Image: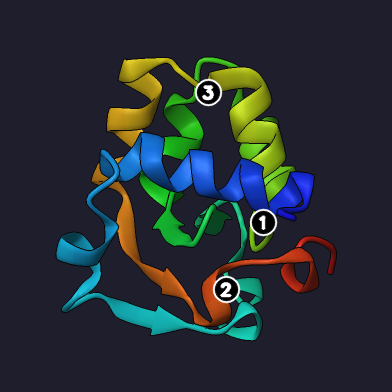
């Protein structure tokens, strides 16, 4: 049985990567949650969605919902928030995909959700 959180991360990964995770991750850098947490301010804003690590630093000041939204999530797993607000939106998913810098060690999970 798949937990709800795991299913959400799987859908997030499929949505962002078009479901072709194996092909797109072969040469991708792998980061631990500790490494992601070090990028926890607006000017250095990394986030996790699904199993992906994204550098949202350049997008913080351009985010339509305001900079504060991303600043409060910097260095954290934002899978649930991203899917709640942007899941199924092609523009948001394409923007996120363009910011991908790697994948999270262990494939994502609750361990990185709260700091």
Q: What separation in Å lies between label 2 and label 1 (alpha carbons)?
A: 9 Å
Give the vertical position of 44 relative to 12 (above or below): below
Specify the quadrant that holds the N terminus. bottom right
Q: Which mark is residue 87?
A: 3
Image point (39%, 82%), residue name: 30
Q: Crowding near pointer 3: few (<14 within 10 Å), some, many (20+)?
A: some
- Nearer-N-terminus badge (3/2): 2
- Nearer-N-terminus badge (2/1): 2
In the drawing, does residue 19 fall left or right of residue 26?
right
Residue 19 seen from this side:
yes
Specify the quadrant that holds the C terminus. bottom right
Q: Which residue is mark 1?
A: 77
Looking at the image, is mark 3 or mark 1 nearer the viewer?
A: 3
Residue 78 seen from this side:
no
Q: Crowding near pointer 1: few (<14 within 10 Å), some, many (20+)?
A: many
Q: Which residue is mark 2?
A: 36
Q: Classify mark 2: helix, strand or loop.
A: helix
- In the rendered image, residue 46, in percent from the top left (x then y), is placed at 51, 60
> Pointers 3 and 2 in contact (CB under 8 A)?
no
Give the vertical position of 96 relative to 54 (above or below): above
Hey, which residue is sitting farthest front in the picture? 1
Q: Classify mark 1: helix, strand or loop.
A: loop
Q: What separation in Å lies between label 3 and label 2 (alpha carbons)?
A: 22 Å
Q: Which mark is residue 56?
A: none
- In the rendered image, residue 33, in percent from the top left (x then y), is placed at 63, 78
**Which of the 4 image quadrants contains residue 92?**
top left
In the drawing, does residue 67 fall left or right of residue 100?
right
């Amino acid at each position: 049985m798949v937990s709800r959180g795991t299913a959400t991360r799987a859908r997030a990964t499929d949505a962002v990567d078009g479901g072709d995770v194996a092909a797109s991750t072969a040469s991708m850098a792998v980061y631990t949650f500790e490494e992601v947490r070090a990028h926890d301010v607006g000017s250095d804003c990394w986030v996790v969605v699904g199993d992906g690590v994204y550098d949202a630093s350049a997008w913080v000041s351009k985010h339509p919902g305001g900079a504060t939204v991303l600043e409060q999530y910097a260095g954290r797993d934002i899978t649930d928030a991203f899917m709640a607000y942007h899941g199924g939106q092609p523009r948001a998913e394409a923007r996120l995909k363009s910011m991908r810098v790697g994948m999270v060690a262990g494939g994502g999970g609750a361990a990185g959700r709260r700091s």
